[in-house]
Amino acid sequence: MTTALVLRAQGIGHLLTAVPALRALRRSGIRIALACPPELSELAALTGVVDRLIPAYGLEPILWPGLTDRNSDLPFFPEIAVNLHGRGPRSTELLADLRPRRLWAYAEEAYPPGPKWDEGEHETRRWCRLVEWYGLKADPRDLLLPSPTTPSPAPGAVVVHPGGTGLSRRWPAERFAEVARAIAGEGLPVVVTGSRAERPLALLVGTQAVLPPQIVYAGRTSLRELCAIVAGARLVISSDTGVSQLATAYGTPSVTIFGPESPHRWGPPKDRPRHQALRNTADPSSVSTRDVLSAAAAVLSEGLVRR
């Protein structure tokens, strides 16, 4: 079986938006060695299409096992290298340095073969179009993940996820607290999620929402457990971050507050009304608490907005 080294060395949302392209590779009979951060190994396994994970961070050099380990079951050079990381040139150069037999990437001056980059294209469609250019069939709608076998520690809860990479993308903590307090006031269970680094922020949201500290799961769950929480949730409310992509992948109703990135590039598919994207301007703080509660009511058809 042909082996492809696929570079996607970014976060949760980046990996999930590349799933349809990865599945197109697998359907064509290609074995996938995914270069991504090792902390995403559990999520990579849940996609069902990754055969091997190659530890990689951003635009750091890739250590291909075939070059360094004589006992590796991988070929000396990658048979195909696929750049699902970015437009290049640096990401393409990293793959070219490994001397693959074939290199699939968006066209650059040094690497002219390939399709032309479209800056405004949705991230999922972008990578499907790349592999289609090389003769594969890809479906941008093929985003869903199977439910994890790990049981959710908070089944049926409303997930409030206040963190995310980049302060400019975050909705204010006090607004998340207002939303959490209002939803809990309707008698619905609420949990606050996040990474270990985001635990202080999550605790702040829980405290301001006047909720007990045990509902704060930030920093207390593995990635697989976080996936189980999202898969079994009643609703996910977050800024534009990887958890919103998880909600889409599991078909869990969601409300995502965008800014400055446009939902036209990173938002949920337009044909899925149970996922609502909110963005008034480039500043996410312009979205009000009432906006979010109204959107939550719309996706759940429940009276979460106090009248």
Image (tube, grey):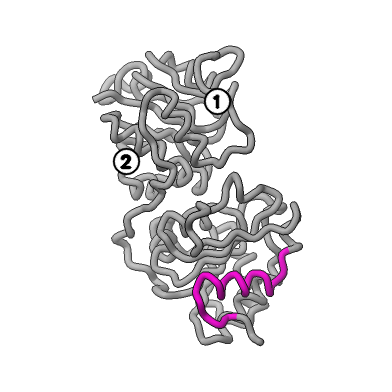
Foreground residue among 161 and 281 = 281
Q: The residue tagged with tag 2: helix, strand or loop?
A: loop
Residue at (42, 66) in percent of width and height: 229
Residue hosting label 1: 91
**Residue 82 image position (x, y, % from top left):** 44, 26
Asked if 72 appears above or below 217 in the picture, the reply is above
Residue furthest out toward the left: 1
Residue at (49, 48) in percent of width and height: 12
**Residue 8 image position (x, y, % from top left):** 48, 35
Residue at (54, 41) in percent of width and height: 123
- Looking at numbered disc 2 in the image, what kind of residue is underneath it? Val
Foreground residue among 265 and 231 = 265
Asked if 120 appears above or below 250 in the picture, the reply is above
Q: The residue tagged with tag 1: helix, strand or loop?
A: helix
Q: How many marks?
A: 2
Asked if 161 appears above or below 21 in the picture, the reply is below
Residue hosting label 2: 49
Left or right: residue 249 compared with residue 280: left
Compute the Cα span from label 2 to label 1: 22 Å
Left or right: residue 38 compared with residue 177: left
Mark 1, Cα crowd under 10 Å, few <14 / some 14-19 / many 20+, is many
Disc 2 + disc 1, Cβ < 8 Å? no
Quadrant in which the N terminus appears = top left
* The magenta stretch spans residue 296: yes
- Looking at numbered disc 1 in the image, what kind of residue is underneath it? Ser
What is the span of residues highlighted in magenta in the rendered image?
Answer: 287-304
Mark 2, Cα crowd under 10 Å, few <14 / some 14-19 / many 20+, is many
* The magenta stretch spans residue 151: no
